[in-house]
Amino acid sequence: MTTTPSASNFSLASPEEVLAYIPHALGFYPRNAVVLLIMQGSCLAATLRVDLPRTECSSATAAQWAEQLVQLVHKVPDATAVFAAVYTGQVPGGSHDSLPKHELVERLAPELVHSGIQVRDAWYVGANRWHSYFCLSENCCPSEGFDLPDLALTETHLRMVVAGSAPEEQIWDGGGVAEWGNKSAVRMNQEILARELSGSVPRESLVKDWAGLLDADPAVAERRLRADDVLCASLLLSLSDRMIRDILPYLAGRGTLRAFEALKEVSRASDFGRASQDFSDFLLGTAPCTPDWDRIERLWFLCRDLLGVAEGEEACALLCLLGWVNWAKGKGSSALRLFGSALKNDPEYRLAQLMGKLVESGEMPSWVADPARAWRLRLEGRLSA
């Protein structure tokens, strides 16, 4: 599942504009999935992506699938309507009633309407063409549908590209990060630090190293990280300590002072107070706060950069941190892919197991569906009523 909150500063008034917008909202081109654009009145509140059933499903399975989607839609406060798009690689037949997955749409649409959610339109998006499930005559649209490449010529797509959006062909799995030229020097320093500390990790000092980078201008932080082999080695070493690893999203999203208060309480392993409770609530997405999205974005780039020098447990920790950030933004599909990559590296990596189950269950942070607190794309849109 992926949810992406939206602002409202340009029009998405036609099917072509909506379908051109979806890959930019998700950050990738969906495959074998249904995407629901969830409305609050005339405003786009969230974009929800859910996998299609892998095989032809029974009536009971289709009903269960539809019920899951209805429940997810109602997690968005004050949801009033949806637009639906079904993505597969299939080639449809020559008639409107032969569109792939039409039986799922026929099951889902009444369920949504019965729950109080209007279904404005539903489209099938194939490899080369798109069709409307609700268009039943040639007067509405041709039976062969419309050319998908034409979406690249829409105003929405062009404006998103100009704004810097570039959807990937598939969800990023954490791979493809170039190895650092000074990796051997960093690894050598990391081994030296590990021997010197002999398992006694100076948590406050290491958290301060992370805080210093999160507080700095991103360009300055990147240069410092790349140029200081010892600093980089200390950051990698810190990832082997679960308490430091887990405090990093909180350090980014709630600030340095709060993070140190929580670190002190959690380190006592007893007599927990409000700081440790806020820390726990934030990691689980139940805290009633607004995350510091600028700092969280810096954490994401730092972790991605460090993948070029990390190994083993460090790489698993970084993939989980990247996954958490995407989950916090509402990008559940991207988060699942990263947690899956961590488990490929180490099938027993506990944080990846726990977060994967959390995301698969459809849980999302409370702030995702709250326009005042949620992460936003740089360029969003308004759907016409």
Image: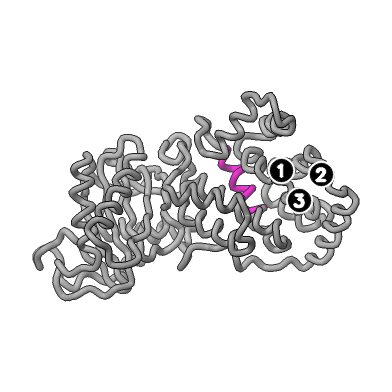
Q: Amino acid at mark 3?
A: Leu
Query: As drawn, is 223 to the left or to the right of 193?
Result: left
Q: Residues within 10 Å of mark 2 (few under 14, many from 20)?
A: some
Q: Residues within 10 Å of mark 1 (few under 14, many from 20)?
A: many
CA gap, disc 1 and disc 2: 10 Å
Q: Position of residue 204 (x, y in %)?
A: 78, 37
Q: Residues within 10 Å of mark 3 (few under 14, many from 20)?
A: many
- For label 1, the SS is helix
Query: As drawn, is 44 to the left or to the right of 248?
Result: left
Q: Amino acid at mark 1?
A: Ile
* Highlighted magenta segment, given as a residue range: 292-302
Residue designated by label 3: 235
Q: Position of residue 203 (x, y in %)?
A: 78, 40
Which disc, if any, is residue 201? 2
Which disc, if any, is residue 169? none
Q: Amino acid at mark 2?
A: Val
Q: Residue at x 45, y 37 (%)?
A: 366
Residue designated by label 1: 244
Residues under numbered marks 1 and 2 in contact, where contact means CB atoms less than 8 Å apart? yes
Q: Position of residue 183 (x, y in %)?
A: 78, 65
Q: Earlier in the sequence, mark 1 or mark 3?
A: 3
Query: As drawn, is 267 to the left or to the right of 150?
Result: right
CA gap, disc 3 and disc 2: 11 Å
Query: As drawn, is 90 to the left or to the right of 260?
Result: left
Q: Residue at x 84, y 63 (%)?
A: 185
Queried whether the magenta region covers residue 276, the answer comes back as no
Q: Earlier in the sequence, mark 3 or mark 2?
A: 2
- For label 3, the SS is helix
Q: Earlier in the sequence, mark 1 or mark 2?
A: 2
